[in-house]
Image (cartoon, grey):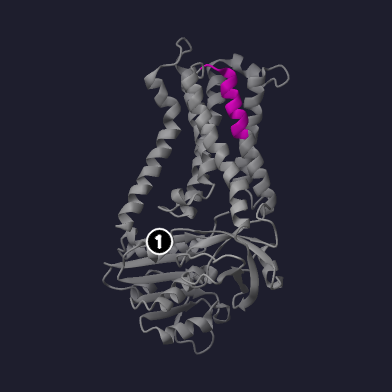
Amino acid sequence: MFQKKIWVVGIFWIALHLLLTLSPLLILLIQPAPSGRGFWIEFSAAFGYVGLAMMMLQFALTARFDAIAAPYGIDIVLQYHRYITQVAFALILAHPIILFFHDRQYLQALNFFATPWRAKFAIISTIALILLVVTSVWRQKLKLNYEVWRVSHGIFAVTAVGLGLAHAFGVNYYLVLPWKALLWTLLALVAFGSLIYVRLLKPWLMMQKPYRVETVVPQRGNAWTLVLRPQGHEGIRFSPGQFAWLTLDRSPYHIQQHPFSFSSNGDRTDQVALTIKAVGDFTNKIKHIQPGTKAFLDGPHGAFTPDHFSFSGLVLIANGVGVTPMFSILVTFAQRGDRRPIHLIYANASWENVAFREELEYLNKQLESLSVTHVIKKPPENWVGESGYINQDLLARHIPRDREGWRYFLCGSPRFLAEVEKALHELEVPAKYIHIEHFNLV
């Protein structure tokens, strides 16, 4: 019943997003715009309006509304946000290009100091949109610090959408009628209301439920487990496999927020744990965090959890620190006394880098329903387990022959996920039974 409800909600949000995106064109079916401008000008305007509507709705997609993200997982929503922004960028850029090719007189609008304000708004909006896309797509190549990128990303987005809307009202061709202007006003409220929620209201809500660092536990593989205890509230309950955005030693209004998976029992509210691999500026500082440091959590988020599905058994496949949500699933199911079979297939570069190695050995002995298969790229001498990489042949040896009723949860690096997913498809595992958690949320 729960799965059916999630499916219905998912279809609803897709339909609503499509309806709002196309609303500038759909209203023309109710009452057409004034005539006399010709096909190519109207065609160009259609691209611009649809692209602008898409951009305005991006604020709602990135505001981390649980109701929107629940059917898909926030990682899927953020990936969709990236792709749809590129589509909107192409549509908006096509708007002036079509005009320039149709009538070269429109090129005069590029004379910034002589052109009307509505054209100035369009030029600045387009430049902001280009900078937004360039700094997002090539952020790593440009070596932009995450916090710097996040601030600039917000500035570019607000500038592009705000001035794009000002340009549309300045032209005032389609927006002569009050009810058409009302439509764009409502879209603006959705956009900037979402921005106010995520930048002002949500941090205030987080401040009402602070945490303190209880301890920092070193893990193998250059990872660290941050154990947090709620201060003055009951804590949060999460489904195993979910994650939260962490603000550490800062106000939640600070721009520094990073997503990490929970690695503790989801049913336990008196403390939570997040396991973090040291791979960057922020994560390399985790090992130096002192007990008592204040922390805030925005979560739980994510649909990467077996709690949302019915199943007879689980196959968990991970590499490196991708085991973190899997470990949360294992310890939660162990505490619940769940006896459904679970197969963990876990890849690492070396035996010494296996995070939670001792804990997994303990769980493997305590849970008769659990089997753990380690896959070591460079195994030690006298290694008798699997070695090399997780591929189709290895999976064929370890996954159940009966595919019905089993759920497959994958977490790891992008290349790893692509190869494992392809191998599972070739082994005829139905796509609807495969669930993937991506690392690249930001």
Residue placed furthest toward the right: 113
- As for residue 309 lying within the magenta part, the answer is no
Q: Position of residue 258 (x, y in %)?
A: 61, 58
Kindly identify the amino acid type of the residue bearing the numbered disc 1: His
Q: Residue at 67% across / 52% down in the picture?
A: 253
Q: Which residues are magenta?
A: 160-173
Quadrant assignment for the C terminus: bottom right
Image check: 329 left or right of 136?
left
Q: Residue at 65% across / 63% down in the picture?
A: 295
Label 1: how many Cα within 10 Å (few below 14, some 14–19, many 20+): some
**Residue nearest the observer in this picture, 369 or 388:** 369
Image check: 96 left or right of 242?
right
Q: Position of residue 225 (x, y in %)?
A: 60, 73
Quadrant assignment for the N terminus: bottom left
Residue placed furthest toward the bottom: 382
Which residue is the site of mark 1? 435
**Chief secondary structure of the magenta portion:** helix
Q: Position of residue 223 (x, y in %)?
A: 61, 73
Q: Residue at 46% across / 9% down in the picture?
A: 36
Q: Is residue 132 above or below residue 115?
A: below
Residue placed furthest toward the top: 36
| Quarter holding residue 303 | bottom left
* Circle 1: element type: strand
Q: Is residue 392 above or below residue 40?
A: below
